[in-house]
Image: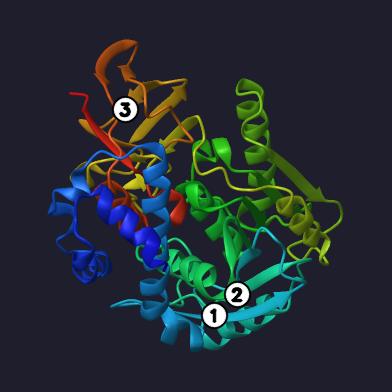
Amino acid sequence: MKKTLLATLLLLSSLSYAQTDKFVKWLKAPEGELCKQKFAKKKLDKKDTKEASFIIDSLWLQESAKELRKQWDKLTISNDSLTLPCACRTFGMYPQDGRSLYISLHGGGECPKEVNDEQWMNQIYLYQVPEGIYVAPRAPWNTWNLWHRKGLDELFEQLIRACVVFEGVNPNKVYLMGYSAGGDGVWRMAPRMADKWAAAAMMAGHPGNSSQENLLNLPFTIWMGENDAAYDRNRLAKEKGELLDSLAAANPGKYIHSTNIIEGKGHWMDNADADAIGWMSQYRRNPYPKRVVWRQEEVLREHFYWLSAPANELEHGKRVEASIEGNTINISSCDYSKLTIYLNDNMVDLDKKVKIYYKGKKIKTFKPKRTIANLYRTLWLRGDRSYAFPCIVEVRLD
């Protein structure tokens, strides 16, 4: 970290240079005192915000490296209760815009550990990618719902963060894929974590009761053998493809997808599905889409793109739809009593007033305020440098 940049930020905050060490300590403690300090609440202009973002991001990378170093050295992502062993392969040269990351979920399910281990080994070498880091994680348990249980999302967020920090992965080039029970996981993880992926590919999986509404901004490809009739997988794949056709027709330019039913093939498609990798790689995540549809799935999530809902109100099936046009935010539907909206200079003009409408009625007009505290709080909250927001606004909708 350059002291000149830090000194600039400190001067903006009316701090003396002698307080630099204290400032650094505050930044290194996610639950620390920084957000309570007067300088952290001081309004910044656009240029100051870029300077502050650079400093906070640099320190976040340093602290993430310390936190995750031992885990990544062992290729085992873990938290207090779960462990996610990973196998990692690297392909191609390092591109200027950072490496891609492909997370590939193995099959198996409700079977002995040895069977799931064999499926994991198969997944490690099942695909090759033109460029990037190919990671095949081993599910933490041996149950039918390998990839759609509570606790997995946090592990995957740690995995992505580790690859960003240690492998130079571009967080806007992260792709999700999976085969069989791994495909089951993609049906569920892709929509509920749509704000994390650039694109997703489902191979030979069962959709269960997953919804595809959240795929508004996430390119999604379906691969299924024509004769893969177990659990009605082939029929359901066709139906879900037709549903996405309808959603795309009703929302031009959105719900980008492809449906591939492989003629004459059963559960094993003889690697025809490998074409999904090239299809996915053409896409990049847009972390700030102008329109968001957010439906809660089986595993509940508090944040989605530039929105947050109250933790105590989360419930399967609850829904929000919101959009941004110029400096106007429109909330067309919401099943919560309030929403938190995160903004940056890529989304609206933070030097002008912002208006918020709910169901066509104006409910708030405000002058945005960029602050260090907001940048700091949101970066540590989301664990994703794209989601460090300088402006936060809460609106009540009840």
Between residues 268 and 398, which one lies in front from this camera angle? Answer: 398
> Around disc 1, counting alpha carbons within 10 Å, would you say few (fewer than 14), some (14 to 19), or many (20 or more)?
some
Q: Sequence-wise, which precedes: disc 2 or disc 3?
A: 2
Residue 288 horizontal/vertical position (percent): 49, 39
| Amino acid type of the residue tagged 3 in the rendering | Cys
Residue with the mark numbered 1 = 86
Question: Along the horizontal axis of the image, is 161 left or right of 315?
Answer: right
Q: In this view, does 47 lie to the left or right of 354?
A: right
Q: Are marks 2 and 3 in contact (CB under 8 Å)?
A: no
- Percent coordinates x, y for residue 122 in the rendering: 69, 80
Q: Nearer the viewer, residue 121 or 170?
A: 170
Q: Distance between the residues labelled 2 and 3?
A: 37 Å
Which residue in the structure is indicated by mark 3?
334
Q: Estimate the x, y position of residue 103 in percent, counting from the top left.
A: 60, 66
Check the picture and name the quadrant holding the N terminus: bottom left
Q: What residue type is labelled 1?
A: Cys
If you read the primary sequence from the N terminus, does the residue marked by circle 1 or circle 3 appear first?
1
Q: In which quarter of the image is the C terminus?
A: top left
Q: Residue 136: which disc?
A: 2
Check whether the beta carbons of the residues at disc 2 and disc 1 lie within 8 A of each other: yes
Q: Quadrant of residue 219?
A: top right
